[in-house]
Image: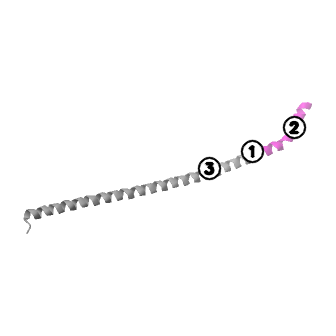
Amino acid sequence: MPSIIDMVSQAEAEALSLKKDAERQAKEMEAAARQKAQAQIQAAQEAGRNRVAAAIAEAEEEGKHIAQEICDQEAAKATASSQRAREALPQAVAYILERVKA
């Protein structure tokens, strides 16, 4: 029959073994959690980069559209101004010729 001292020693050894197992499991769980968190962070960063790239592309496309609208408006103004100048040209020529004759 084991003595009380032997039983206490055995219980302490088992407790130490259980403690070491628990520490090992805790470290493994922590490492797994860190890995999972890192993977989630990387996925979120990639998703963020993709969203930024899409927003930039959309903004560039909108900018091109706005620039084209401005060009079209300015071209229309220039065409109207040229048309008015062409319409006024005969009067201007007549005025100049009248002044030259005088």
Of callouts 1 and 3, the N-terminal one: 3
| Place of residue 53 in the rendered image (x, y in percent of width and height, measured from the top left) | 54, 52
| Place of residue 39 in the rendered image (x, y in percent of width and height, measured from the top left) | 42, 57
Q: Nearer the viewer, mark 1 or mark 3?
A: 3
The residue singled out by tag 3 in the image is 63
Is 67 on the left-hand or right-hand side of 97?
Answer: left
Is 69 on the left-hand or right-hand side of 83?
Answer: left
Q: Which residues are magenta?
A: 77-102
Looking at the rendered structure, the kind of residue marked 2 is: Val
Q: Which mark is residue 78?
A: 1
Q: Tell which of 60 and 42 is nearer to you.
A: 42
| Residue 28 image-quadrant placement | bottom left
The residue singled out by tag 2 in the image is 93
Compared with 79, 31 (above or below) is below
Q: Secondary structure at mark 1?
A: helix
Q: Which mark is residue 47?
A: none
